[in-house]
Structures are given as C-alpha cells and as structure tokens.
Image: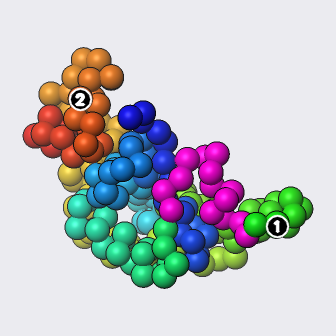
Amino acid sequence: MKLEDLTLIGLDTREAVDLGTGHRTWPLTHHRGPQFNASRVSTGGPSRPYLVLPKDLLELFYSRFAYANPSGCAVSDVDEMDTHLYLAGTPEEERRRLWDAGEVGWEVFDWRIPPHGRDPIRRYLPELFEPTVLQRILDDPRLDMSRKAPRAPANYEDYWQDRSRHYRWSDWWNER
C-alpha cells in the first residue's frame, strides 16, 4: 500500500478538504485532516498555518460536510479530482470559469475566502471562530504540525511505522 496525498471532495458542494498524506482505505478520522491558519479565523490572530483540528471538532466537521453532500464524498488524489468536480462533458473553458470563480474545487480551509464571499469554514465550523476554541487549539502543541514532537523518530520514513493511521494520532506524537 502506497502513501498518497489525498483530498476529500464533496459531490454536491464540489468543495475540497485536504486530508494529507495517507491511505485511501483509512477512515476519515485516521487521516491528518485539514490544516488551517489561525489568522484565517481570528482577526489579529497569530499566523500559525499548520494547525489541525482536535478530534471532537474534526468529527463534527466531517459530519457536517457529509450532511452538506447527500450524494456522498470521494477520496481523491490530484489526478482524479476533475472526475469528481465536473460533470462529464463539461468543456474546458467552462471548467476554467468554474474553478476561477471558486464554484468548484475550493479548499474549505484555504487561507482565503472564496471569490463569491461565502466562508466555508464558518459554514461548517462556526465554533472555530470562538476565541476560546481557537485558544484551546493554539495552546495544544499536538495540534501544531510545525512543532516537532520530543519523541519523534530521527528518520522521517519512521514516522509512518504504523500504516493504519497518520502519525498525528500516534503515541509518540501525542505524548507531550
């Protein structure tokens, strides 16, 4: 089984969620999950771009995303995304227009708000905009993927010893 950079695509909303590196066979909650920048959800907040959601908010997000996509969601790599984002036969010019307008393929946790003004983070996780919730995330070193864990393996390949989930869920990452 090979590790891949994977994205979750909502088949109705046509929005994307970066799952990170992992295996297609993993349950969603075994992936790293989306990363976000603290300054995206807090005016004047710190610029910490590699934050991940705690398990409770991650599960809440996935349930709301699934609800918004009654036709389902697809786990995809970059080469397969178009088959999930566009209806078969959509001309290239129309594909470009939809993409540029942010109507398809918009990453929910992108550092920008989509061109048409709706904020997908606020739609799915309004809790993330509450100062106490964001502070809880900022205070938890396990949720900042830029911080090396004290017990991290010396070799990056060894991060992936447990092939059943992303290393953010491993004991060595979470024992801080």
Q: Residue at x 33, y 23 (%)?
A: 156
Q: Are marks 1 and 2 in contact (CB under 8 Å)?
A: no
- Say which quarter of the image contains residue 85: bottom right
> Which sits in the foreground, 159 or 143?
159
Please state the horizontal and vertical placement of residue 57, each as a whole percent of the image. 28, 68
User: Residue 85: within the magenta?
Assistant: yes
Q: How many marks?
A: 2
Describe residue 172's horizontal placement relative to residue 13 as left or right.
Answer: left
SS of the residue under disc 2: loop
SS of the residue under disc 1: loop
Which quarter of the image is occupied by the C terminus? top left
Three-letter amino acid code at the position of disc 2 = Gln
Describe residue 138's horizontal placement relative to residue 34 as left or right.
Answer: left
User: Residue 20: within the magenta?
Assistant: no
- Say which quarter of the image contains residue 12: bottom right
Badge 2: residue crowd in 10 Å (few <14, some 14–19, many ≥20)? few
- Say which quarter of the image contains residue 131: bottom left
User: In the figure, 148 relative to 154: above or below?
Assistant: below
User: In the figure, 140 relative to 152: above or below?
Assistant: below
Q: Is residue 97 visible?
A: no
Q: Is residue 155 visible?
A: yes
Q: For residue 90, which numbered disc appears in the image?
A: 1
Chain part drawn in magenta: 74-87
Q: Residue at x 39, y 44 (%)?
A: 23
Q: Residue at x 62, y 51 (%)?
A: 80
Query: Mark 2 sits on what residue?
Result: 161
Please state the horizontal and vertical placement of residue 14, each as a whole percent of the image. 61, 70
Please state the horizontal and vertical placement of residue 78, each as a whole percent of the image. 61, 46
User: In the figure, 8 relative to 77: above or below?
Assistant: below
Please state the horizontal and vertical placement of residue 41, each as a whole percent of the image. 44, 66
